[in-house]
Image (cartoon, rainbow, N blue to C red):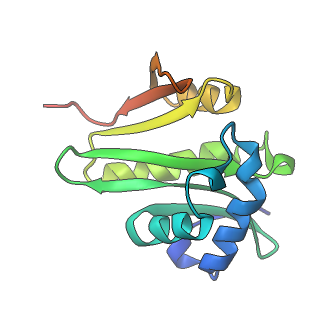
């Protein structure tokens, strides 16, 4: 059975998180490790972000991570959502995204932003289903998506 918890409420370590990211890095159009050290990325997410992990049998099978702490612009940001191939199609990404949206709402964010590569059809569909509005395609072939949580003043 897949369970979803806040990373801080699990027994997983930074090494577990970094290893999961290492295993999944090539599932992205631009591999995760080409921009930064995956351990440094994991450390940053743990220290400054919000992470929800989907896990089964003492192993991480998916996660969503981002930031819900910009008190100036009141903007949240999804940095990554990834799920093992064998667990896709079971609604787990929906559950992960729902938890992140709830965390941003509880943290007083007005909007959530995310970038996704134009080739990531699954993510584009997921964000659209959750009411994220697709913006323009960038020079790096990424779409920006924005979800308004409450009326912006």
Is residue 95 or residue 110 the one in the foreground?
Answer: 110
| Location of residue 69 by image quarter | bottom left
Name the residue at 58% across, 67% down: 5
Toward the right, the furthest residue is 86
Tell me: 134 left or right of 93: left
Name the residue at 69% across, 30% down: 122
Q: Quadrant of the N terminus?
A: bottom right
**Vertical arrangement, residue 8 with respect to residue 127, above or below:** below
**Vertical arrangement, residue 113 with respect to residue 99, above or below:** above
Name the residue at 82% across, 73% down: 57
| Image location of residue 110, percent across then percent down | 26, 40
Q: Is residue 132 visible?
A: no
Is residue 111 or residue 115 the one in the foreground?
Answer: 115
Is residue 119 or residue 124 the one in the foreground?
Answer: 119
| Location of residue 59 by image quarter | bottom right
Q: Is residue 65 visible?
A: yes
| Image location of residue 43, percent across then percent down | 50, 72
**Vertical arrangement, residue 67 with respect to residue 137, above or below:** below
Q: Quadrant of the C terminus?
A: top left
| Image location of residue 123, percent across then percent down | 63, 33
Report the number of numbered marks: 0
Toward the left, the furthest residue is 153
């Amino acid at each position: 059975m897949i369970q979803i918890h806040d990373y801080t409420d699990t027994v997983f370590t930074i090494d577990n998180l970094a290893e999961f990211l290492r295993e999944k890095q090539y599932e992205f159009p631009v591999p995760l490790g080409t921009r930064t050290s995956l351990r440094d990325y994991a450390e940053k997410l743990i220290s400054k972000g919000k992470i929800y992990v989907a896990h089964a049998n003492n192993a991480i099978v998916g996660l969503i991570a981002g930031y819900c702490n910009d008190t100036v612009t009141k903007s949240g940001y999804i940095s990554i959502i990834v799920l093992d191939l064998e667990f896709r199609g079971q609604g787990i990404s929906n559950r992960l995204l729902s938890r992140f949206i709830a965390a941003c709402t509880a943290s007083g964010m007005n909007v959530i932003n995310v970038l996704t590569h134009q080739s990531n059809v699954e993510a584009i569909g997921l964000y659209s289903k959750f009411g994220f509005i697709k913006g323009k395609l960038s020079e790096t072939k990424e779409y920006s998506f924005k979800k308004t949580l409450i009326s912006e003043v």
